[in-house]
């Protein structure tokens, strides 16, 4: 499905990004595993190599730093000769209302979750143009369209990701670059486990989803793979929930 496409995956040391990197390689992609977490990222590359199903390299990347995002795209071109696709997925989700979120935390969340997407796209688009086109998928969240308590900075950042993705879809359609956005519901990853451990009053998340369960990282990765692949050639500017019906339920 991604035969010989060169794909950068950010946040690929863990959770949805790791699952996506492994899946994309299995379906023929050459993958740049980008993350700040060196240990986790090397494990992701190891899993890909062990499966003998695809090629992968690790590029240490802080998505909030333009030097790193530019170096990440350069690494893709130096190693694999081109860049076709970007799964811009790295993110953090600290809690807090507007009242108790410090200015420093606000800036950190926005600079990883939103500025990080802008920087990765800014660095990637010129190479995609050179390759004759490309596909970008950004990970937002159902929280980008439906507010939940105590997540002000996260929600603001994820709403911004949706708007940014639509803007890219519009500006670069003429260059044969598509951009789409995924809104996961609750997905079984270290990020969710940490969030639930720190907020025990929230309880089990399954009930909010029409399907009565939370999702698995592979269920988000497979939507990302479809959107990156040529199978979605007429899909751009789309905002797609992968949430077991969470956004369809009136609670
Ligand atoms: N798990 C969920 O329930 C859920 C729901 C909705 C949206 N999301 C979104 O999905 C994406 C992936 O989340 P996950 O659940 O797999 O989380 P995760 O914590 O398992 O993985 C996130 C990865 O991002 C990396 N990262 C953090 N800051 C970074 C930075 N500055 N530069 C590069 N990498 C960085 C981490 O090291 C980690 O490997 C995030 O954008 C998250 O907001 C997750």
Image (spheres, rainbow, N blue to C red):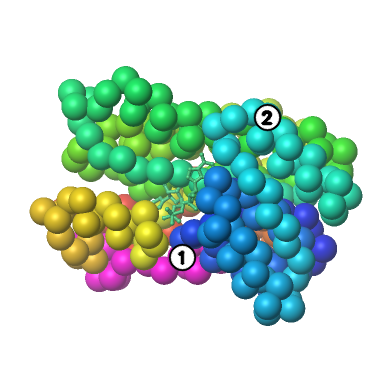
Which residue occupies 18% across, 51% down?
A: 199
Residue shown at 55% from the left, 45% from the top: 36
Q: Is residue 240 visible?
A: yes
Number of on-image labels:
2
Of badges 1 and 2, the one in the foreground is 2
Q: Is mark 2 within 8 Å of ligand 1?
A: no
> In the rendered image, is residue 176 in sight?
no
Label 1 packing within 10 angstroms: few (<14), some (14-19), many (20+): many
State the residue position of label 2: 67
Does the numbered disc 1 mark a residue whose Cβ is under 8 Å from ligand 1?
A: yes
Residue 138 position within the rendered picture, expressed as x and y whole percent measured from the top left: 55, 45
> Is label 1 in a helix, a strand or a loop?
helix
**Magenta residues, start to end:** 208-222
Q: Where is residue 134 in the image (x, y as percent from the top left)?
A: 75, 46
Question: Which residue does the image show at 29% across and 55% down from the upper left?
Answer: 194
- Farthest front residue in view: 39
Query: Upstream in the sequence, badge 1 or badge 2?
Result: 2
- Is-magenta flag for residue 245? no
Which residue shows up at 73% across the image and 76% down it? 53
The residue singled out by tag 1 in the image is 217
């Amino acid at each position: 499905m991604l035969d010989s496409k060169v794909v950068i995956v950010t946040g690929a040391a863990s959770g949805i990004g790791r699952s996506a990197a492994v899946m994309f390689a299995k379906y023929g992609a050459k993958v740049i595993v980008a993350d700040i977490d060196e240990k986790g990222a090397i494990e992701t590359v190891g899993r890909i190599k062990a499966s003998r199903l695809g090629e992968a390299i690790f590029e240490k990347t802080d998505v909030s730093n333009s030097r790193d995002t530019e170096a990440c795209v350069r690494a893709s071109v130096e190693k694999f000769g081109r860049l076709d696709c970007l799964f811009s997925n790295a993110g953090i989700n600290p809690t807090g209302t507007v009242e108790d979120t410090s200015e420093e935390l606000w800036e950190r969340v926005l600079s990883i979750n939103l500025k990080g997407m802008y920087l990765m796209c800014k660095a990637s688009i010129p190479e995609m143009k050179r390759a004759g086109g490309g596909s970008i998928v950004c990970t937002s969240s159902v929280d980008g369209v439906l507010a939940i308590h105590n997540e002000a900075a996260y929600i603001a950042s994820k709403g911004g990701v949706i708007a940014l993705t639509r803007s890219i879809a519009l500006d670069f359609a003429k260059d044969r670059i598509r951009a789409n956005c995924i809104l996961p519901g609750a997905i079984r990853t270290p990020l969710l486990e940490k969030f639930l451990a720190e907020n025990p009053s929230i309880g089990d998340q399954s009930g909010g989803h029409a399907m009565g369960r939370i999702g698995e990282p592979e269920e988000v990765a497979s939507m990302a793979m479809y959107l990156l692949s040529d199978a979605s050639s007429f899909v751009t500017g789309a905002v797609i929930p992968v949430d077991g019906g969470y956004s369809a339920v009136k609670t």
